[in-house]
Image: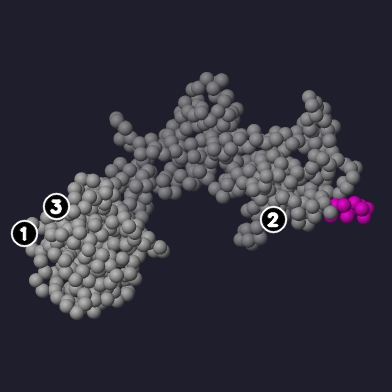
Amino acid sequence: MTEEERVGGMLEIEELAAGPHPLTGLEVTFLDGDPPRAGRFAFFRLDRTLGSEREADTDLALGAGRADATTLELALAAGRSVRRRSVPATLLEPAEALLTLLDVSGSETATDSARVWAAVLTAGLGLMARGHLRPAISPSGLDAWRAGPLERSDRALLEGLALAMPPVGHCVVLDARRVPLTVHSAEFLIEAAWDALADTLPRTAAAAAVSGSQLFSATSATEPTPCSGLRLWLEEASAGLDGDASFALRVELPGPPEDETKGVLQIASAADPSLVVDASELFSMPPALLHRFGTTVERDLLLALRRGARAWAPLGDLLRQRIPDSILLDDDLLAELICEGASALESAGISVFWPSELLHDGLSLRAMMTPAPAAVAEAGFDLTSLLEFRYELTLGGEALSPEEIDLLAEAKRGLVRIRGRFLAVDPELVAKAQERRARRITAAAALAAALAGRIESDGEVLDFVPSGAVSDMAERLRRAGTDRLGSLSAPGGLLADLRPYQLRGLAWLAGMSELGLGGCLADDMGLGKTVQVIALHLHRVEQAGGDTAAAPTLVVCPTSLLGNWERELTRFAPSVPVRRFHGGNRDLARIAAGEVVLTTYGILRRQRAALAEAGFAMVVADEAQAVKNPMSDSARALRSVPAAVRIALTGTPVENRLTDL
């Protein structure tokens, strides 16, 4: 190589590194090998030919020092004919190519062949992750891992990838001396690439150390390990896995007049996956139909059953039948098949199909509230009362009986049949369901859980089923925001025309106060929060009738708003007695039934005891953002004044945290 060529190659490598993606413009194909791990991925450019200027392979940057150079003979379409063409190429081992190609998904400049081969390797990794690899013997008698068995979905994916593969992705000429030119099919090369992955990834130094042998663990293609002595066993173990038929055990639940579950052996055609028959029909079907399952289907069936019987012994009953048909499955055998047998059969190339009604994953835990004490059901709904709930185990939303829970607890296999369904047993769920200890929560927490339908307990979130007064209160709360909106008219004695949104605010405040919960009215400044509270006070006076203790209201506000409250009350509700508890003549004696007492946050802090003993039915905190810090002295003083209804007014939006509410 001349100095000019070397410099030119280095410059182009730098251009690739600085470009959008190192695979930009590179085509990709696969060259199969024996053993499979000897296969190589080839990277080349169609705009390069042998003898061209700067022939040095610029794609060596891909190999990170482990790439090999070669020349490829390609069969490429040229108009209506196919032409032979030689191009320089870079070869990468499967593991190296895997790291290079998996990075292609985010590139917009990669070629179609690079994208499809990246998808091929991704699919191959999926096969390996699911354990779809098996020992085999290569054509030259060497140990080899191969991908498989391929399920129906895998074969469908294989067909889709082959259809997406552009011609340049499998265009290497097999024999330059033959005419016409021949190349491998896309399907063949994709399966060969999967085999190369399967023969590369499991081979690690750790695997060799554990096995103590190079057989099926040698990490390099230059360390071939002959295994001709295992040929018969390997061929028998693999026979039928890649044939024209696939085998499965179909579980059928009993139906009249039968009374036992059975597993039916069935066969599907690889050429036509929709063609599925019971194995018992195989020996009586017409030759034309039988041919669609392959010429060796009877041998493949026998070998599949022998593999299956080694994986799960009960399947051996089919080998003793003159015509393999079905095996009976009692509850113990069915549970064994679900827990262990199905995965073992899958590894032997026999799928297991389940009826949808057999397996059920609906076993769950929920919190069921015990009947609430009478104190909670009384008027006012004491949010500080303590309530109890217990765990309850459910299946499909229906509670299991204590006997059924005990049956789950005694299950030995982790699987038990209840109500005609098999359930996987979670010991922790069952243990919690068997507890007799009740858990305590406040009525406020129970009400929140009832509204949300969920509760957090012992670090997990469970469905919550309320009862009694809590259930009633939750339902009344849901209705409070809808049923009464617009249905409540302005009370008598109010000398103001309420706007529609103010009537809705009045209805909501009245609904909350009747539930004994209160609320936060956060209308913007100037929208008339004061007149809504005055209307609420008059409404409560009307509702109280002759009850002199039901309607007195305390309004706590900044000093600058005392005069405003007094003027508004005098203007809009002249019949309401108003008293200032502020200044030198502070007096709380003989508060009238419908009276409103006005005070400030400063007076509240200093005389909280006197205000707490006055017996207010409703406390209103105006400009409540002043007490949003629950640890402040003003907030503590406000909470010390008992009242059945507590209303907060603020025109300042909640700025940072919902806890401000």
Q: What whole-number distance in Å separates the C-alpha atoms at marks 1 and 3?
A: 16 Å
The answer to which of 579 and 202 lies nearer the viewer is: 579
Specify which label sits upstream in the sequence, 2 or 1: 2
Tag 1 and tag 3, C-beta contact below 8 Å: no
Q: What whole-number distance in Å separates the C-alpha atoms at marks 3 and 2?
A: 93 Å
Relative to 499, residue 579 above or below: below
Q: Position of residue 1 (x, y in %)?
A: 92, 52
Mark 1 residue type: Gly
Is residue 79 rendered to the left or right of residue 138?
Answer: right
The answer to which of 416 and 215 lies nearer the viewer is: 416
Q: Residue at x 66, y 50 (%)?
A: 103
Specify which label sits upstream in the sequence, 3 or 2: 2
Residue ID for mark 2: 219
Q: Residue at x 38, y 38 (%)?
A: 356
Is residue 192 rendered to the left or right of residue 409?
Answer: right
Residue range of the region highlighted in magenta in the rendering: 1-10
Q: Residue at x 21, y 77 (%)?
A: 583
Q: Quadrant of the C terminus?
A: bottom left
Front label number (3 vs 2): 3
Label 3 residue SS: loop
Q: What whole-number distance in Å separates the C-alpha atoms at marks 2 and 1?
A: 95 Å
